[in-house]
Amino acid sequence: MPLVREETEHLHRVLRELDARGGGIGFDLPNPYASGLLSHARSSGRDGRGYLDALLVSALIEMRSHERFVRLRACAATRPLHRLYDALGEAEARHGTLFLALALEAHDEGSVRERFDELARVESALLDGLDPGPRVHSGWRGL
Ligand SMILES: [Fe+2]
């Protein structure tokens, strides 16, 4: 399933879950995690470094989402949402792998590994500085 369609279907699924619980989607607040990562991505150019960084930032975001869904799934209090978390977590893991595969199609493995490690260190520092919050990408690494 194409990535955009799958992500859109997931958004609609989450909206249905929120609606069923009397909630809804709020304003789209700035996301310091994503914007922080993107601020470290190099700009696009002929050398493809911007494209590589976009893919690797996307991979990190998807992989972190997978991790968070796995942890949410482990919480007994979220039992009514476990099937949702399973589905979203599986998809996020697959998306992370897809972005890494695309990076490896365009660049040599050494360059991909080196830049991925650099961006992962940036991500780690970002997560350490974020406040905990009711979103997948917030602080509090011990979620
Ligand atoms: Fe995703």
Image (cartoon, helix red, strand yellow):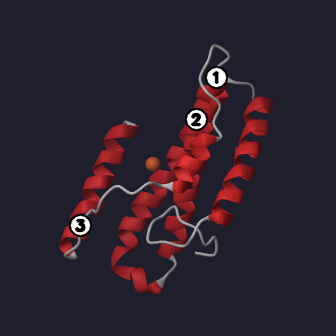
At label 1, counting other C-alpha atoms closer than 10 Å, the crowd grade (few under 14, some 14-19, many 20 or more) is few
Residue at image x 34%, y 45%?
6
Residue 95: x and y, percent? 50, 45
Q: Is residue 13 above or below residue 51?
A: below
Residue at image x 57%, y 57%?
64
Spatial CA span between label 2 and label 1: 10 Å
Spatial CA span between label 1 and label 3: 40 Å
Residue 31: x and y, percent? 48, 55
Q: Which quarter of the image is occupied by the C terminus?
A: bottom right
Residue 107: x and y, percent? 69, 24
Foreground residue, 33 or 7? 33
Q: Is residue 51 left or right of residue 122?
A: left
Q: Which quarter of the image is occupied by the N terminus?
A: top left
Q: Nearer the viewer, mark 2 or mark 1?
A: 2
How many numbered circles does the render carry? 3
Q: Amino acid at mark 3?
A: Gly
Asked if residue 5 can be seen in this view, the reply is yes
Q: Amino acid at mark 1?
A: Ala
Asked if residue 1 can be seen in this view, the reply is no
Checking the image for residue 106, the label placed there is 1
Q: Amino acid at mark 2?
A: Leu
At label 3, counting other C-alpha atoms closer than 10 Å, the crowd grade (few under 14, some 14-19, many 20 or more) is few
The residue indicated by pointer 2 is 55
The first of marks 2 and 1 along the sequence is 2
The residue indicated by pointer 3 is 24
